[in-house]
């Protein structure tokens, strides 16, 4: 599996064809363990309220496009507001 920085770069440049496990690895790295696991959805807690919410879904091993696009936005907010 590519490293986290490579996955994030791919997500920003081309949010299609991102594997769900790769998206989970990025979210685990930036937001910690998911609040909900064991279903097709994973929900990650963020240190702010409102959008973008981190709720990702496994669709036949792939992440959904619109959810992939939300994660880099959330990472940017996290880096700006919390200096990560």
Image (spheres, helix red, strand yellow):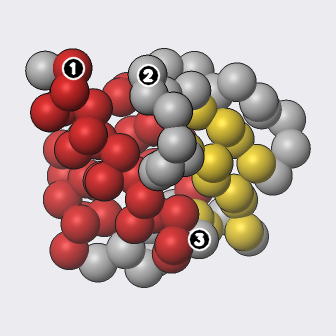
Instruction: Tell me, for residue 55, which label it has, or none.
Output: none
Disc 3 crowd, CA 10 A, few/some/many (<14, 14-19, 20+): many
Q: Could you say whether the residue bearing mark 1 is in a helix, strand or loop?
A: helix
Q: Earlier in the sequence, mark 1 or mark 2?
A: 2
Seen at 20% across and 74% down, the residue is 13
Disc 2 crowd, CA 10 A, few/some/many (<14, 14-19, 20+): few
In-image side of 18 versus 1 (left or right)? right
Q: Which residue, given by chain and number where applicable, does mark 1 sit on?
A: 82
Tell me if residue 61 comes above or below residue 49 in the rendering: below
Q: Could you say whether the residue bearing mark 3 is in a helix, strand or loop?
A: loop
The quadrant holding residue 44 is top right
Task: Give the percent coordinates (x, y) of residue 57.
Answer: 69, 57
Q: Residue furthest front?
A: 50
Seen at 49% across and 49% down, the residue is 51
Instruction: Tell me, for residue 64, which label it has, or none.
Output: 3
Q: Residue furthest right?
A: 39
Tell me if residue 50 comes above or below residue 81 in the rendering: below
C-alpha span from label 1 to label 2? 9 Å
In-image side of 63 versus 78 (left or right)? right
Q: Which residue, given by chain and number where applicable, does mark 2 sit on?
A: 47
Task: Confirm or deny contact between disc 1 and disc 2 (CB under 8 A).
Answer: yes
C-alpha span from label 3 to label 2? 23 Å
In-image side of 74 versus 49 (left or right)? left
Task: Give the percent coordinates (x, y) of residue 77.
Answer: 26, 40
Q: Nearer the viewer, mark 3 or mark 2?
A: 2
Q: Could you say whether the residue bearing mark 2 is in a helix, strand or loop?
A: loop
Task: Give the percent coordinates (x, y) of residue 7.
Answer: 28, 53
């Amino acid at each position: 599996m590519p490293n986290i920085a490579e996955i994030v770069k791919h997500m920003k440049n081309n949010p299609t064809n991102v594997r769900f496990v790769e998206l989970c690895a990025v979210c685990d790295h930036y937001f910690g363990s998911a609040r909900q696991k064991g279903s097709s959805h994973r929900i990650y807690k963020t240190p702010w309220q409102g959008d973008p919410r981190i709720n990702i879904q496994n669709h036949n091993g792939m992440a959904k496009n619109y959810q992939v696009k939300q994660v880099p936005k959330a990472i940017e907010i996290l880096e700006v507001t919390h200096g990560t």
